[in-house]
Image (cartoon, rainbow, N blue to C red):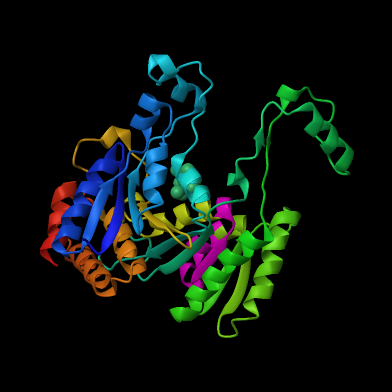
């Protein structure tokens, strides 16, 4: 029996290719794993009306970790139109499987390392080395949304809101509500994860990204909790910044930052900005980490226009696999994989199109595998 059971979730579009490429390096590492395929994504939606079928959910309950490629998502009306005829008009609603997965398995930490590998022609600045901790289950992603707005909710809100109420007197379909819901528990555990990480890896500073001056209830609570938590980590400096200012300062002074922690949506936004500073879509990867399960993925989407062309950069997925190895305690394999990847980037002989080269997805993976 293999040492680890890994759910293998390629998804669709380029997800399939970057996962195939990643398998080349994992196999070269002699990583002792059994890979179990799980259906997820657009094909499952079109065929079954569920992008995240129950059998895949069950699989995730029985593995040590999962590696996930990419999936397509489309607006509700288009999604409905692409269902097999028998399922159309049955009231099925498309919801992002990745968001569902994070919530269902309580994968509350979204860990996104942002590292400028030397020699990457896409680096905004050399030497950038940041880590984003994004809360991964709540906030504006809670999924508590109303369009049209139910009468009872409208009445309650009108009665409760003392301030500006732009919705007062509007018909239910003239406005929509998406709730930003943050809990003390959810806020505290992500802040703690960021500080634990900083302490463990000798990082000097944790910056809380928020908008507490305006979004007082939720972000105000997040910031208060961060101040409390920080007291337990005297060796780590607490810093905070508004999300809008942060997007400017990060570009201006990327070396002023170290570990960033944010509620879900700001973390989503800031991590894309950060990823672009170290090479963009081909280099952004994440761990969705809970107490029992962790799912690792490149941050990019399924890029349907490149699907099947063996063209896109697999490094983000290969680095996601590296993080999976770390999380499973396979430290020396993880290190070897990161070093081999860094070496190929530094040598600059094998580069995919995004890096200005013409290497294929597979050639990039083979070059990395050759260095292992
Ligand atoms: C990400 C993505 C997802 C998100 C999408 C695909 C639902 O942008 O992982 O950052 O918003 O979390
Ligand atoms: Mg995102």
- Quadrant location of residue 58? top left
Residue 265 is inside the magenta segment? yes
Q: Is residue 242 left or right of residue 157?
A: left
Q: Nearer the viewer, residue 356 or 283?
A: 283
From the viewer's perspective, is residue 307 above or below residue 368? Answer: above
Where does the magenta region start and end? 247-266
Could you say where residue 268 lies in the image, as x and y percent from the top left? 51, 51
**Predominant SS along the magenta part:** helix
- Residue at 57% from the left image edge and 60% from the top image edge: 262
> Residue 152: where, in percent of width, then height?
81, 30
Residue shown at 58%/45% (left/top)? 141
- Residue 54 visible, this orientation: yes
From this viewpoint, which residue is outermost toward the front? Answer: 1
User: Is residue 161 toward the left or the right of residue 295 in the image?
Assistant: right
Location of residue 220 (image quadrant): bottom right
Image quadrant for the C terminus? bottom left
Instruction: From this view, report whether residue 337 is shown above or below residue 363.
Output: below
Total number of numbered labels?
Answer: 0
Quarter occupied by the N terminus: bottom left
Q: Is residue 331 above or below residue 355?
A: below
Question: Could you tell me which residue is drawn at 26 percent across and 72 percent down?
Answer: 335
Q: Residue furthest left?
A: 370
- Compared across the picture, whether 360 is left or right of 192 comes to left
**Residue 280 placed where, x, y %?**
36, 52
| Residue 224, picture quadrant | bottom right
Inspect the magenta stretch and tell me whether residue 325 lies in it: no
In the displayed image of the protein, which residue is found farthest to the bottom? 235
Confirm whether residue 312 shows in the render. no
Q: Please state the horizontal and vertical placement of residue 366, each as a whole percent of the image.
A: 13, 56
């Amino acid at each position: 029996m293999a040492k680890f059971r890994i759910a293998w979730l390629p998804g669709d579009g380029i997800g399939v290719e970057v996962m195939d490429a990643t398998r080349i390096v994992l196999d070269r590492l002699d990583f002792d794993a059994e890979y179990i395929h799980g259906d997820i994504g657009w094909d499952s939606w079109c065929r079954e009306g569920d992008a995240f079928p129950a059998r895949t959910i069950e699989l995730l309950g029985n593995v040590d970790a999962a590696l996930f490629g990419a999936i397509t998502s489309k607006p509700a009306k288009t999604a409905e139109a692409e269902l097999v005829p028998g399922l159309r008009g049955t009231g099925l609603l498309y919801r992002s499987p990745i968001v569902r997965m994070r919530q269902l398995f309580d994968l509350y930490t979204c860990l996104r390392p942002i590292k400028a590998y030397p020699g990457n022609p896409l680096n905004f600045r050399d030497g950038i080395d940041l880590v984003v901790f994004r809360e991964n289950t709540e906030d504006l992603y809670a999924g508590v949304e109303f369009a049209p707005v139910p009468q009872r909710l409208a009445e309650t809100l009108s009665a409760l809101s003392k301030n500006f109420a732009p919705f007062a007197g509007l018909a239910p379909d003239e406005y929509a509500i998406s709730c930003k819901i943050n809990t003390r528990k959810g806020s505290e555990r992500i802040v703690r994860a960021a500080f634990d990480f900083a302490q463990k890896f000798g990082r000097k500073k944790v910056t809380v990204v928020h908008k507490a001056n305006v979004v007082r209830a939720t972000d105000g609570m997040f910031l208060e909790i961060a101040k409390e938590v920080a007291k337990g980590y005297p060796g780590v400096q607490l810093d905070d910044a508004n999300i809008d200012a942060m997007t400017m300062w990060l570009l201006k002074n990327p070396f002023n930052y170290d570990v960033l922690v944010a509620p879900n949506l700001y973390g989503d936004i800031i991590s894309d900005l950060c990823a672009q500073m170290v090479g963009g879509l081909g280099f952004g990867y994440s761990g969705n980490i809970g107490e029992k399960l962790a799912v690792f993925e490149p941050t990019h989407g399924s890029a349907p226009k490149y699907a099947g062309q063996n063209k896109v950069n697999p490094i983000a997925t290969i680095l996601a696999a590296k993080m999976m190895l770390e999380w499973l305690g396979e430290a020396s394999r993880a290190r070897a994989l990161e070093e081999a990847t860094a070496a190929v980037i530094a040598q600059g002989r094998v580069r995919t199109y995004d890096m200005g080269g013409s290497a294929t997805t597979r050639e990039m993976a083979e070059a990395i595998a050759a260095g292992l």
